Amino acid sequence: RAAAGPQYLNGLNPEQREAVETLDGPVLVLAGAGTGKTRVLTTRIAHILSQGRARPHEILSVTFTNKAAREMKLRLGQMLGQAVEGMPWLGTFHSIGGRILRIHAELVQLKSNFTVLDVDDQVRLLKQLLQAENIDDKRWPARMLAGLIDGWKNRGLTPAQVPSGEAAIFGNGKGGKLYASYQERLKILNAADFGDLLLENIRLFRENPDVLRQYQNRFKFILVDEYQDTNVAQYLWLRLLSQAPSRPGVPLSAIIPGDLTSPRLRGDVDARSASGEGDPPQTEIAETTPHPDPLPVKDAEREKAAPIPKNICCVGDDDQSIYGWRGAEVDNILRFEHDFPGAKVIRLERNYRSTGHILAAASHLIAHNEGRLGKTLRTEDVDGEKVTVTGSWDSEEEARAIGEEIEELQRSGENLNEVAILVRASFQMREFEDRFVTLGLPYRVIGGPRFYERAEIRDALAYLRVINSPADDLAFERIVNVPKRGLGDATVQMLHDHARKRRMPLFEAARAVVETDELKPKARGALRDLLLQFDRWRAQREVTAHTELAEIVLDESGYTEMWQKDRSADAAGRLDNLKELVRSMEEFENLQGFLEHISLVMDRDGDASDEAVSLMTLHSAKGLEFDNVFLPGWEEGLFPSQRTLDEQGRAGLEEERRLAHVGLTRARRRAKLYFATNRRIHGTWSTTIPSRFLDELPSANVEITESKGGSGWGGAGGYGPSRFDNVESFGSSYTTPGWQRAQANRNRSQGGRSGQARGGFEESQSSFSGGFSRNKRGPL
Ligand code: ATP
Ligand code: MG
């Protein structure tokens, strides 16, 4: 290593280098898209390791997706010139939280092989609870309760902590009680839902200071990517871990004082303490009276007792905060300096990702938001190609046009791995999938409707889950009569009654029931056979490879045969999927490891080795980059999403705009936007108007192109399809004050927009405006 320092530092700009080399004390990197935040984090880890400041297992590093974690490991290996063995604590909040929870499962009344439920399981379980409480599922849908519970968990609230006013909004005041009994049921089932992976982890730490201390001791460095999207629970969890190990006897209140929780949470806590509910004091979040000021002066007492914050480095971008709907709090960024006194805040301004036109378009668009910290971004790259905007008649034509453009790119030598299609809503994907299959274009779906969520895969997994954990009632219930064995609803209901009465899992209840004559002989025989099969499979598990076991189970259970006999068009595909499932298990050492993986795979990444177009939602595209980015569906109602506007008004609009900004800033060399005039959403055709976000792009950086789908769109000077008389065409030049009329139209048809975005329309002369066809109907 020369005087210039280790090689991995080469090429970093001075600010990046500072962020990498400032190892002691808290660091916040607040910077725009493509400025190298993630690169800084990775280099920082390399630096910590090569300086010998910590060993791999002493670094806690949180990424937003599992894929990002894998990528980071790969890059690390490249930087250090050798594969990095074991960075066990590099992963998502949930994977790390789940890992810690498994180690100490008994302390939160679980066993270490607990099952992680997905949303469907969750809903089924809640339905049972609603039934038991005689609550009408139609009036109070289980899905709604699942959403509420998820929201509470994201905010770090245990059943006892949910403010009574909020708990009351479901099921005539029974929401809180249902949340409590849901948690109880989970324990009996030896299961946790996704939110529990963190919430239960927080509880574990709060109730077991010695365990917390152990992890505080271990993690010498903490690094967090995409900090703008952390929610309250993640924030609390980080807070707990990011303190230097507390001495025994230092009360937890010194570590998590009340004023550290988000304003929203503080409000809630207030309401709760007034009602006298809550956990014992030493485990409370807000045992100290919340200070009325948002950022109160430091409490001298606390300063003394509180240990020094550890070497924590968070990177984020307020303009990319896109998970508000999931409880993310961009406030966490704003609070950083307060929470970590002495924090060094570093700003990065040079964008290394995108060409000039793309960066200008993205910056101009996001400038329409009011709630931002504001920042400058520059690139030293060439201007490159302008951002294109293309209109089509409908989504099919849009898919056709994009398909053709991609083929053209491919012919010109582009690697398909550098092509991505980013959609606002996952239903938009099917059209592209269909198109790609027709064209024979390889593609992969990232993060979206997952392979593992297909019905046949879930059935197969249910068998494996029951083998792995006999207490997994939901899995057992799913397959007890699949294929049909004459164990219908009545039987299942009876097993349930049994299980509830004796507080035992269904499987155990079934064992008891077959010994009695409560079931008709036929059902009893079938149930006994099934139980015996499971016993046999469990025994086989000890001596057979898990992939082989899966094949045996699918055969012997009659499940494969069920699909072989099935006459429907997709049966063959399902059989293929089952085969693929068994193949996918090969990558894992054993069944437990595989099931663990399934429960955590939130982003399905496909195999990276093959060249393929990536298809994903804008939300899953965070942090990624591609040479060519296609952005279809820029229409009012779809993007910005009408639902977001209806539910969250202006704040929702700003979040949608950030999402548009995230989309544009994924592109290195080409960004291509599309809108269709007709779109079918959930089976209903609607006529649409182009997204307001298109109006907000600077004309100097944008070019309108014609659809290559070839349906006779456009033509000389016209972007409006004159064949439709409900559509006005503003089209022939940019001088038409089209945006004014369109705007007036829109304001009339839609209450969601209150006033213009600041700065936006003063600049409208230079803004890209007009040029698109407008119709007189409202948005979707
Ligand atoms: P986002 O906000 O989208 O997550 P980011 O700030 O994390 O973006 P990175 O993904 O780390 O940005 O970097 C963007 C691109 O710029 C990457 O391809 C990265 O390798 C490159 N890059 C970052 N810093 C430099 C540098 N100093 N020299 C050359 N390339 C760089
Ligand atoms: Mg990043």
Image: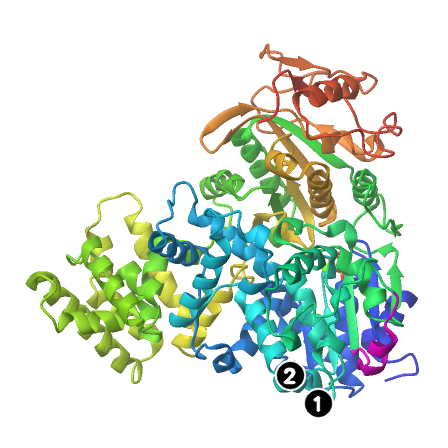
Where does label 2 land, which residue?
A: 209
Magenta stretch: includes residue 277: no
Mark 2–mark 1 CB contact (< 8 Å): yes
Residue type at mark 2 is Pro
Residue 153 drawn at (x, y percent): 57, 61
Q: Nearer the viewer, residue 403 or 398?
A: 398
Q: Where ligand 1 lies, by quadrant? A: bottom right
Quick check: 494 left or right of 320? left
Q: Nearer the viewer, residue 565 or 244?
A: 244
Residue 306 drawn at (x, y percent): 80, 80
Quick check: 262 left or right of 302? left
User: Which residue lies at the image location 77% right of the left edge and 49% below the top edge?
Assistant: 319
SS under mark 1: loop
Residue 199 drawn at (x, y percent): 58, 68
Residue 67 drawn at (x, y percent): 60, 64
- Residue 488 visible in the current orientation: no
- Residue 727 visible in the current orientation: yes
Task: Give the distance between the C-alpha atoms of the residues marked 2 and 1, in whole angstroms.
Answer: 8 Å
- Which range of residues does the magenta coloring cover? 297-310
When the figure is inspected, residue 573 is found, relative to residue 716, above or below; the finding is below
Q: Residues within 10 Å of mark 2 (few under 14, many from 20)?
A: some
Q: Nearer the viewer, residue 561 or 53?
A: 53
Residue type at mark 1 is Pro
Q: Quadrant of residue 357?
A: top right
Where does label 1 land, which residue?
A: 248
User: Which residue lies at the image location 14% right of the left edge and 57% below the top edge?
Assistant: 486
Q: Quadrant of residue 463?
A: bottom left
- Where the C terminus falls, by quadrant? top right
SS under mark 2: helix
